[in-house]
Image (cartoon, helix red, strand yellow):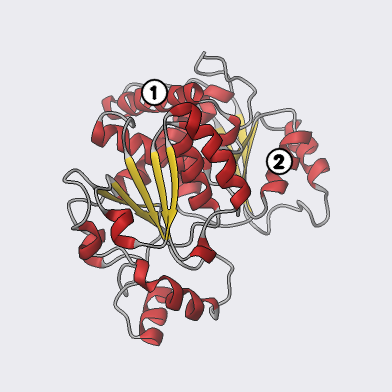
Amino acid sequence: MMLKNRDFLKLLDYTPEEISYLLDLSAELKAKKKAGIPHRLCEGKNVALIFEKTSTRTRCSFEVAARDLGMGTTYLDPKGSQIGRKESIADTARVLSGIFDGIEYRGYGQSIVEELASYASVPVWNGLTDEFHPTQILADFLTLRERFGSLEGVNFVYMGDARFNMGNSLMVGCAKMGMSFTACAPEKYFPDPALVAICREIAEQTGGSIRLTEDVPSAASGADVIYTDIWVSMGEPAEVWEERLADLSPYQVNSEVMALTSDRAVFMHCLPSYHNRDTEIGMEMCERFGRDSMEVTDEVFESERSVVFAEAENRMHTIKAVMAATLGGAE
């Protein structure tokens, strides 16, 4: 399949067939990696990694994937780029396009990465914005294919704040791939109605479904996947915790929730997670609110049903596939 010179900004831009191709390529490259078979498909190319928001998994995944493909990387941290400050997004895109063969952006508004791509003459990849996180969804779906053999018929439930990148992207991904998607949260945390309408139209064509509910037992009953994310995102003030805890505590993933799911059900999380007190923020918030965990209990996070570290590894394999395909290395 020809994806050379395509941007990877959101899954709405890709067909189900193209997403399946990227998952197939991810599995192929992962198998080669595990077997020690070199796959330097993009030898001699160089990519820029713009991180206005720092990350462990995304940075490591892009750097290792690029290196495996034979490429060099230049990491631009929040202070290492003048994008939007001394240099416009349009100018940055054109400058970097003359130096690099591809550009990754991880930061804030989706409009930034879209504008970057509109002016760049090389592929641009979305490493995360406030609205979408497409590389994470590829990793999640590769993990589910490895676990279930297929995405067909998967009953997928997202619990918690579904208004932003993870809720949005999982809903889009499930709609594209014909899966049943349920967002389970208080109504004010439901995804944007306009995006819900788009996803329902897509799901009608693919055999999927989109459901929004506040009822935890109804959502979890028979679910094949229970997915959650942290309740407060990077950059939000600590005061937000009080409101989120009050609203979202009934939607914590715990053993009672998992007991309602199907026999094959897995727990998923994009990480990082406040499942215990072993981080500075986790300790601070747990002590402040008298809790041992936040969005998921440690019992569930560490259980045999948890596939969170398989997801984390698959970030690298799926990102590698995206870069190889869009740079023409997988032709």
Type of residue at label 2?
A: Glu
Residue 137 position, x and y percent, is 45, 41
Q: Label 2's element? A: helix
Residue 181 visible in the current orientation: yes
Residue 315 position, x and y percent, is 42, 41
Numbered circles on residues, count: 2
Graded by Cα atoms within 10 Å as few (under 14), some (14 to 19) or many (20 or more), the crowding at tag 2 reads many
Q: Could you tell me which residue is drawn at 28 percent across and 29 percent down?
A: 34
Query: Is residue 91 toward the left or the right of residue 291 in the image?
Result: right
First-in-chain label (2 vs 1): 1
Q: Label 1's element? A: helix
Question: What residue sits right under mark 2 in the picture?
Answer: 114
Pick the front one: 167 or 213: 213
Q: Which mark is residue 24?
A: 1
Q: Could you tell me which residue is drawn at 49 percent across and 17 percent down?
A: 330
Type of residue at label 1?
A: Asp
Residue 65 visible in the current orientation: no
Graded by Cα atoms within 10 Å as few (under 14), some (14 to 19) or many (20 or more), the crowding at tag 1 reads some
Circles 2 and 1: CB atoms closer than 8 Å: no
Residue 303 position, x and y percent, is 19, 57
Residue 206 position, x and y percent, is 45, 28
Marks 2 and 1 sit apart, C-alpha to C-alpha, by 26 Å
Q: Could you tell me which residue is drawn at 41 percent across and 21 percent down?
A: 39
Q: Could you tell me which residue is drawn at 50 percent across and 55 percent down?
A: 55
